[in-house]
Image (cartoon, helix red, strand yellow):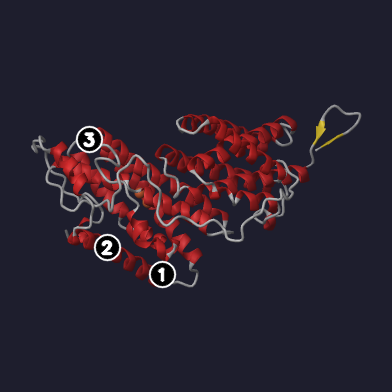
């Protein structure tokens, strides 16, 4: 941006606009990737749900910024390179925050507010006719960013941390981001000693501290009445948090992937969290407390994470291949027994699952490009079989840790008179395979 001495207007040429747009894109994309990297570690349930939704929104924002950068004659080959290297390098340290609280402060009290100010400045200074597409995109982003900050403010308010600690986290981080040139740039080294080893995803997903420790989510026996059938479905749904964590893990684990893979994985992250929230809603309606009356547990990660993120990708893809059929059957069954909200959940879930199958396949092809279709099928089926074996072993050996949950479930269902029509479909998509 230059100001000509005799003129009262600002002149911003296309080259400057495209460079700014590229830096906004990098800021949003790398913050989104770091949020995805931290999502599995996040313990606070309200913040975890919020994070998944904002990852998706941020991916949509990054997509708009990326497309506008390319509109502005930016060389296509360069838009995803690391021109803003110091800022990118520093943002990739975001998930190393020492606590959920610190992470939330860095993202929601520093980076996003700085981004909001920068985008508003851009809007105020650019020509609304010449640069109209930027106006349209940035106005949407500003509105949604503002909503994110309001939502995050409410979540952060609930954190029992002293305001002095929050102010300290905030001040230190503002200086560090400012040291990289802030959101507008130019890019520079903030002197932060970046560790040689990059942030590593946790070995299992964090669960809310108020929830009971648990071993596994699949109940050790079949449901005995309609209420239990509905409950088993709700437990299965609520525990889809692991699938959200897996999609988020892909975004973090694999660097420099084609943008479209990240974009779809961001949606996948939020979809799976929505499915978990559908389960949460149903549990509440049925009168059960999530994580207390029923387990909330990262058991898939517990079984396979040590083999790497690819194993989790293969597992989710293997399980999802049966998802649409399972959810379509459940929709019909729930509708037949007049469970309209449950049927609607399954209807939308089924639509999501169909997309996930193509997202999963694209990711597998990108991560292991030399695998052909047969190899992919073989590997995904192999890990699903192992997963079923893991469940069966825990049930048979009595190491399922379900005793306390079963006591609470049975106490709450004791007085239930089972006069309703039973659901014919399996309560979980694994029921037939586990042979229980
Ligand atoms: Fe799902
Ligand atoms: Fe899915």
Q: State the residue at coordinates (31%, 63%).
A: 384
Determine which residue is flagged by label 2: 390
Q: State the residue at coordinates (52%, 46%).
A: 98
What kind of element bears circle 3? helix
**Foreground tag (3 vs 2):** 2
Disc on the earlier residue, 3 or 1: 3
Nearest the viewer among 341 and 109 is 109
Q: Is residue 411 left or right of residue 266?
A: left
**Alpha-carbon span between mark 3 and mark 2:** 29 Å
Q: Give neighbour class at mark 2: few <14, some 14-19, many 20+ (Cα, 10 Å).
A: some
Determine which residue is flagged by label 3: 286
What kind of element bears circle 2? helix
Determine which residue is flagged by label 1: 373
Q: Quadrant of residue 185?
A: top right
Residue 379, given in percent of the width and then of the height, sits at 37, 69
**Alpha-carbon span between mark 3 and mark 1:** 42 Å
Q: State the residue at coordinates (19%, 35%).
A: 338
**Foreground tag (3 vs 1):** 3
Quarter occupied by the C terminus: bottom left
Disc on the earlier residue, 3 or 2: 3
């Amino acid at each position: 941006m230059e100001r000509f001495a005799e003129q009262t207007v600002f002149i911003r040429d296309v080259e400057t606009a495209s460079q700014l747009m590229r830096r906004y894109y990098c800021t949003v994309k790398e913050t989104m990737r770091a949020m995805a990297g931290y999502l599995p570690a996040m313990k606070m349930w309200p913040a975890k749900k919020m994070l998944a939704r904002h990852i998706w929104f941020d991916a949509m924002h990054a997509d708009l910024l990326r497309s506008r950068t390319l509109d502005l004659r930016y060389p296509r080959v360069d838009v995803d390179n690391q021109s803003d290297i110091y800022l990118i390098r520093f943002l990739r340290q975001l998930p190393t925050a020492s606590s959920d609280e610190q992470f939330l402060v860095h993202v929601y009290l520093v980076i996003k507010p700085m981004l909001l100010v920068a985008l508003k400045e851009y809007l105020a200074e650019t020509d609304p006719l010449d640069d109209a597409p930027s106006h349209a995109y940035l106005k949407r982003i500003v509105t949604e960013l503002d909503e994110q900050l309001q939502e995050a403010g409410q979540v952060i308010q609930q954190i029992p941390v002293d305001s002095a600690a929050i102010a300290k986290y905030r001040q230190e981080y503002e200086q560090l981001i400012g040291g990289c040139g802030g959101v507008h740039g130019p890019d520079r080294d903030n002197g932060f000693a970046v560790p040689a080893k990059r942030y590593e995803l946790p070995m299992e997903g964090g669960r809310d501290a108020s929830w009971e420790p648990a071993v596994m989510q699949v109940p050790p026996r079949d449901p005995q009445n309609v209420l239990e059938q509905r409950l088993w479905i709700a437990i299965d749904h609520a525990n889809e948090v692991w699938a959200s964590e897996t999609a988020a893990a892909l975004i973090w684990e694999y660097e420099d992937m084609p943008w479209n893979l990240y974009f779809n994985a961001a949606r996948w992250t939020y979809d799976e969290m929505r499915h978990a929230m559908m389960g949460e809603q149903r549990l509440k309606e049925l009168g059960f407390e999530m994580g207390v009356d029923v387990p909330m547990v990262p058991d898939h990660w517990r079984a396979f994470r040590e083999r790497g993120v690819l194993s989790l990708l293969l597992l989710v893809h293997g399980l999802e291949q049966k998802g649409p059929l399972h959810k379509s059957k459940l929709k019909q069954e729930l509708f037949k027994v007049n469970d309209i909200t449950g049927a609607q959940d399954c209807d939308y879930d089924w639509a999501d699952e169909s997309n996930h199958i193509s997202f999963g396949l694209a990711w597998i092809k990108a991560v292991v490009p030399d695998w052909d279709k047969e190899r992919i099928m073989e590997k995904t089926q192999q890990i699903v079989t192992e997963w079923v074996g893991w469940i069966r072993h825990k049930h048979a050996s009595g190491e399922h840790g379900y005793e306390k949950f079963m006591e609470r479930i049975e106490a709450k269902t004791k007085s239930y008179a089972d006069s309703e029509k039973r659901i014919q479909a399996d309560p979980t998509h694994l029921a037939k395979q586990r042979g229980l």
